[in-house]
């Protein structure tokens, strides 16, 4: 099977999306950026056995690869436009590729995200690199560095589900909701768009709430307090895990691909699906409280001092 | 070593290039496209042991990864602007990374190509995926599909050197010129820019002159004749290989990353470094001639009928 036959068969839908003057099939794609908009570019790689279990279905691999890149686009407040794909296969069958393409488009189509280029190679480990180009109103991209003292800290959705789902997958257990939260994260594109001009700083949660929030605070030169009892947890997470475990999953688990942002409460009062979890303060530290008592958070979870 | 430390240390030069509003370090890069230009996006992956020998130096790996993507940008007539890098490492040392970064910038800097984003991962095989975004005057991108009957077919540089260099590398022999033509291809950006508005069709030579020219002709719905004795060969290639071998390397060897294009001779008379090798004709076939006699070209070279 030749690279171009493969691409032709499964990935070349002859995109007629807005702004795509020339898609897959030439030396490069030709695109028409929207006047008055800045462009946001993101890139993320997922490797079998490293970022997802090797027996993950092709559709889930593709879906997740697109979704985690969309999440970066959401964290910048941009609307997704164009995607390129570098796909390294080992012994792919035609059904595998068909399933992969289906998962890819399932993640992309709701956002009118067009696949405009790609490269297919062969090696030992399945590797998927996706790039997405988005657009955001000029000089309005959300950054990590804009958090201000007095801001409230928010997250979207519920936190900790994906890490729980991965843990279940790895132990051979199942929970449809939690596992799908790992395999098929929901990129918060609509929320990101609504935060433009309202949020002061934003980041997407890939490495865990505590670590990613810390990155945002460091970039902004501020500190914060988080009240861990305010961190929104899903019912399946609460039902399946004890308090210590679910807080560890939520604070340090990672793979949530929810947004964490800071804003003044009045500015975001009408945005659904967000939860206030703390406040930006003058101290350069990130401190966690549980019902008013200060607690220490590390990779094994949190503990009272 | 964490991903972000690695990126910080070697790849984050806090690019202040034109159009880069925000480079490495946030969820995405923020870029400002030039008004009145279309955008060209390309992506290419190189894997150790597949696309280059596993003992290739880090600097050469990086240089080549950038150069082959630049070559795609050149084939579209665009000027390169921004680059992203997905780098999968196995057991990288600090010197390896330093060498990689040096090779990357050595290839990028002459073109004012800025690294604006990246993702670093770990697996068994070193894998380098580079994307480049370029810009070309609106609706002026060179495509594969524009070749017209009566056009002359041209190539840049000399052909077959890279395949010869790879063959020498694999057999443990050395020739500084030929090996460097494989490891450090020259992307013909300046020529590509001069071809805008003049060439009718263009492609870059990655899979071999015969195969890539055929792709361009098929996309254009035309045929052509090539006079193989006109294909420009370097002195080292002529000195090291017999006639049959060097013609096989030139016609089917691949990895040249020279441009092949069609144009009217008057339109490109003032462009240096190009050689006419044939003509576009009405027949849908691609036929090769050697001093007027028709010859057959396949993967083992060419032979007289």
Image (cartoon, coloured by chain):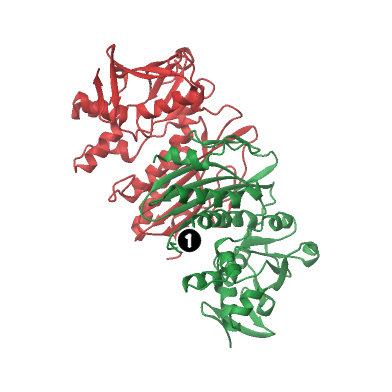
Chain colours: A green, B red
Q: Position of residue B283 (x, y in %)?
A: 42, 15
Name the quadrant containing residue B27. bottom right
**Residue, x 55% and y 44% (percent of image)?**
B17
Judged from the image, the secondary structure of the residue bearing numbered disc 1 is: loop
Name the quadrant containing residue B188. top left
- The local crowd at label 1, few if under 14, some if 14 to 19, many if 20 or more residues have their Cα within 10 Å, is some
Along the viewing direction, whichever of B11 and B41 lies nearer the viewer: B41
Compared with A305, B224 (above or below) is above
Along the viewing direction, whichever of A183 and A247 lies nearer the viewer: A183
Name the quadrant containing residue A67. bottom right
Along the horizontal axis of the image, is B139 left or right of B171?
Answer: right
Along the viewing direction, whichever of A69 and B190 lies nearer the viewer: A69
Residue A116 seen in render: yes
Quadrant where the image shows the C terminus of chain B:
top left
Residue A214 seen in render: no
**Residue, x 57% and y 36% (percent of image)?**
A14
Along the horizontal axis of the image, is A49 left or right of B18?
Answer: left
Q: Where is residue A205 in the image (x, y as percent from the top left)?
A: 59, 65
Quadrant where the image shows the N terminus of chain B:
bottom left
Q: Position of residue A160 (x, y in %)?
A: 59, 72
Quickly name the residue at label 1: A56
Compared with A237, B195 (above or below) is above
């Amino acid at each position: 099977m030749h690279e171009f036959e493969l691409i032709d068969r499964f990935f070349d839908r002859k995109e007629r999306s807005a702004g795509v003057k020339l898609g897959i099939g030439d030396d490069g794609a030709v695109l028409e950026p929207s006047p008055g908009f800045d462009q946001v570019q993101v890139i993320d790689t997922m490797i079998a056995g490293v970022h997802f279990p090797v027996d993950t279905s092709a559709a889930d691999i593709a879906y997740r690869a697109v979704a985690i890149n969309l999440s970066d686009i959401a964290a910048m407040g941009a609307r997704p436009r164009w995607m390129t794909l570098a796909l390294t296969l080992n012994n792919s069958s035609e059904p595998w590729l068909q399933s992969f393409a289906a998962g890819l488009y399932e993640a992309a189509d709701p956002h009118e995200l067009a696949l405009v280029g790609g490269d297919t190679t062969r090696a030992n480990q399945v590797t998927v690199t996706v790039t997405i180009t988005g657009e955001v109103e000029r000089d309005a991209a959300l950054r990590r560095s804009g958090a201000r003292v007095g801001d409230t800290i928010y997250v979207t959705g519920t936190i900790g589900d994906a890490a729980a789902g991965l843990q279940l997958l790895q132990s051979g257990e199942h929970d449809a909701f939690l596992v799908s939260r790992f395999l098929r994260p929901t990129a918060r594109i609509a929320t990101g768009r609504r935060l433009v001009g309202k949020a002061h700083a934003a980041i997407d949660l890939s490495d865990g709430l505590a670590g990613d929030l810390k990155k945002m605070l460091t970039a902004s030169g501020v500190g914060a307090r988080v009240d861990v009892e305010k961190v929104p947890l899903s019912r399946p997470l609460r039902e399946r895990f004890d308090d210590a475990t679910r807080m560890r999953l939520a604070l340090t688990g990672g793979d949530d691909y929810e947004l964490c942002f800071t804003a003044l409460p009045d500015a975001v009062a009408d945005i659904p699906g967000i939860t206030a979890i703390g406040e930006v303060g003058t101290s350069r530290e990130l401190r966690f409280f549980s019902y008013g008592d200060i607690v220490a958070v590390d990779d094994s979870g949190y503990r009272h001092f």
